[in-house]
Image (cartoon, rainbow, N blue to C red):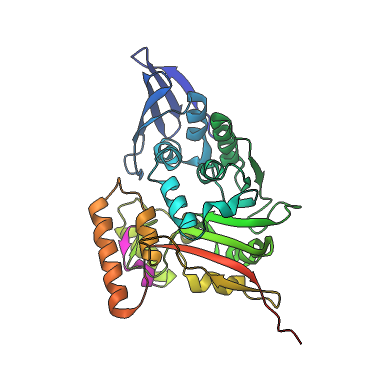
């Protein structure tokens, strides 16, 4: 993990965090409130947002700057994922409570797989305070942030564990009533997907549900997650790589294909996920339908859970086009998947 040091700014209310990739200026704007401004040494490095106001303490901000190898380019988005009510919180509510009533989660156990730095896990803990939650991730740096987030909010219904490697999970996990994957499946390499999906399904209790959301649809016309390029999803790997390197505005010229795969450039389809989970004589996989008023399909769920603060008009037009495509062809093709897969015990015929 790179070293991050502090120094005082020109203003008494400023602290500057120095990272090898740049700086983050933290300015106190009110008691317990800070405004962040990130400045990168490399002007060609992609950054989704570089300004933010937050209630996070400076120690936690510094830990986020240190982690993940992305430094100042990552800090504002990493905090916004958890603090912004229309980012991860909105997506979680739409993708989980769009299928099941919150009363179903009382006194249950949830596995938040690929929890990263804990944005999804801490919100699950607040959504379902009477539920025990286990967050699992491969990165010790991210889990350190997750635990600090937990302490910041005083949450006591979460446990964080580190995966031993990319193809397995910690031992002696037990079973879970629910499993969630929030924006994580696209980051799994193909071999990891083959190993982990059946494993996650195996720790899900009969009658339990696996929720998968914020994973890009593999065949949406624009690859929105990593490159921002149209039609890339339809190209084979050998053509997608040079296309992304030469035409993406997200500074991918020096990336190789394994790194782009880890970054999430290949999404998924419901068919792929269901096929990897497979079937068993004891339980069948049932894809649940949305059950809340005004929501008819996964296009509605994607739109209701999408962050509206960025590109609102574009997202509204995408929503209209997706609904129009469904009316004409019957095909649901939202930009991101929203799945709820229930592990339903088979009913055996009585002799």
Let me know if residue 259 appears in the view.
no
In reply to whether residue 269 is colored magenta, the answer given is no
Q: Is residue 128 above or below residue 272?
A: above
Q: Residue at x 65, y 48 (%)?
A: 107
Q: Position of residue 340 (x, y in %)?
A: 52, 64
Q: Position of residue 148 (x, y in %)?
A: 57, 32
Q: Is residue 166 above or below residue 280?
A: above
> Would you identify the image quadrant in which residue 40 lies?
top left
Residue 305 vs residue 189, the one in the foreground: 305
Q: Position of residue 289 (x, y in %)?
A: 47, 68
> Would you identify the image quadrant in which residue 334 lies?
bottom left
Q: Position of residue 169 (x, y in %)?
A: 68, 54
Look at the image and tell me in which quarter the N terminus lies: top right
Q: Residue at x 69, y 50 (%)?
A: 164
In reply to whether residue 229 is colored magenta, the answer given is yes
Highlighted magenta segment, given as a residue range: 228-235
């Amino acid at each position: 993990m790179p070293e991050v040091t502090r120094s005082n700014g020109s203003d008494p209310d400023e602290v500057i965090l120095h990272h090898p990739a740049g700086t983050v200026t933290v300015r106190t704007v009110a008691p317990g409130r800070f405004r962040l401004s990130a400045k990168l040494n490399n002007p060609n490095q992609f950054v989704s947002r570089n300004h933010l106001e937050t209630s996070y303490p400076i120690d936690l901000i510094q830990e986020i700057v240190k982690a993940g190898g992305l430094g100042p380019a990552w800090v504002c988005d990493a905090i916004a994922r958890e603090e912004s009510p229309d980012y991860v919180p909105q997506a979680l509510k739409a993708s989980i409570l769009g299928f099941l009533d919150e009363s179903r989660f009382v006194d249950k156990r949830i596995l938040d797989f690929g929890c990263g730095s804990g944005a999804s896990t801490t919100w699950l803990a607040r959504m379902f305070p009477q539920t025990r939650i286990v967050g699992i991730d491969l990165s010790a740096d991210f889990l350190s942030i997750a635990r600090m987030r937990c302490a910041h909010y005083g949450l006591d219904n979460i446990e964080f564990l580190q995966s031993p490697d990319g193809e397995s999970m910690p031992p002696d996990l037990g079973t879970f009533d629910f499993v969630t994957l929030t924006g994580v499946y696209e980051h799994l390499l193909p071999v990891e997907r083959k190993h982990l999906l059946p494993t996650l399904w195996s720790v899900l209790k009969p009658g339990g549900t696996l929720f998968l959301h914020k994973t890009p649809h593999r065949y949406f016309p624009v690859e929105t997650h990593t490159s921002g390029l149209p039609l890339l999803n339809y190209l084979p790997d050998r053509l997608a790589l040079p296309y992304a390197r030469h035409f993406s505005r997200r500074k991918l010229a020096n990336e190789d294909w394994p790194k782009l795969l880890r970054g999430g450039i290949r999404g998924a389809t419901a068919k792929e996920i269901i096929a990897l989970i497979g079937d068993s004589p004891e339980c069948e996989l049932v894809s649940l339908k949305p059950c809340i008023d005004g929501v008819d399909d996964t296009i509605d769920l994607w739109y209701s859970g999408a962050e509206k603060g960025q590109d609102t008009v574009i997202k509204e037009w995408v929503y209209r086009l997706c609904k129009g495509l469904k009316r004409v062809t019957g095909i649901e093709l939202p930009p991101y998947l929203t799945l709820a897969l229930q592990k339903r015990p088979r009913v055996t015929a009585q002799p």
